[in-house]
Image (cartoon, grey):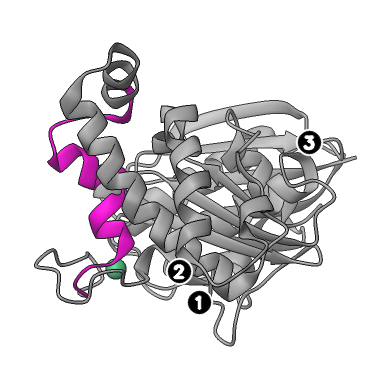
Amino acid sequence: MSVLGVDIGGTKIAAGAVTDEACVVHGVTVPTRAAEGYDVSIGQVYRAIGECLSAGVRAIGICAPGPLNPKTGVVLNPPNLPGWCNVPLADLVCERFGLPTRVENDANAAGLAEVRFGAARGFDSVLYVTLSTGIGAGIILDGKIYHGKNGAAAEGGHVTIDWRSDTICNCGTPGCIEALASGSAIAKRGRTPEQIADGVARGDGESLRILDEIATMLGAWMGSMISLLDPDIIVVGGGVSRIGEPLFSRLRRIAPSRTINQFAAVTPIVPAKLAENVGIIGAASVVL
Ligand SMILES: [Zn+2]
């Protein structure tokens, strides 16, 4: 027996049958063809699911671009899926394939996967952070995703850290951590995370300066998250996290200095364990 995990991205859809031990046994990837509109891209979703369905599959979990409501399974109006507007994705997939289906946002699902199978295994209060093009977060309490009233909770990337900032976030608010310290913010400084990692290893001054600046902001933000949540552990994934130890050592030093929480210095801040297939395993975790 297995479940299906489906990860809908702006450019590709990855799907696969996932075992109870989080092994992806049969994975496929198809282009989303998002620019061709709703009828084409939803057709690609059905195609990806159809290609990896087998008799043993008992449920379908889907990660889709937000905003969406995980409680109802409705995808609202994601900027990178043109034409999608209030799509009842969970109901559509459930009716078409006759299997229980749930929809979740990618950071929540990845966080749940880290709790079930990755770096946060065995912990009750978990903050998952993805540092990528944007910054996403997931809060998992007692093994369950914290959704809030409308399923819109844990938008950690849109916490303001500089209310006077001239940098306006995609959400319209000045000074969100996502606008100031995400992969896109690093790109605006003319570097990729890989180049920062290489540069820091070589002792390049500009790379060190950018890393210090980004880590200072992320550390202050993470300190606030610790004040708010007092988590057992913070797990950090996403492309920017691949800067590795130079980033993590700074976060571990800065975050405890930016919180009232007396226990912050011993709160583990660790890299995510699931890298490959995290989207598929995350989606599957929602129904496992
Ligand atoms: Zn924002």
User: Mark 2: which amino acid?
Assistant: Glu
**Dot 1: what SS?**
loop
Q: Is mark 2 within 8 Å of ligand 1?
A: yes
Kindly check if marks 2 and 1 are in contact, taking CB atoms under 8 A apart as contact.
Answer: yes
Write the residue at 25% across / 45% down. 213
Identify the disc placed on residue 152.
1
Q: Is residue 53 above or below residue 43?
A: above
Residue 254 inside the magenta-drawn segment: no
Disc on the earlier residue, 3 or 2: 3
The residue most toward the top is: 202
User: Mark 3: which amino acid?
Assistant: Ala
Q: Which residues are magenta?
A: 173-194
The residue most toward the right is: 1
Q: Tell me the quarter of the picture where residue 264 sits.
A: bottom right
Closer to the camera in the image, 132 or 38 = 132
In the picture provided, is 267 more to the left or to the right than 163? Answer: right
Residue under pointer 2: 155
Residue 222: image location, x then y, percent: 48, 59
Residue under pointer 3: 22
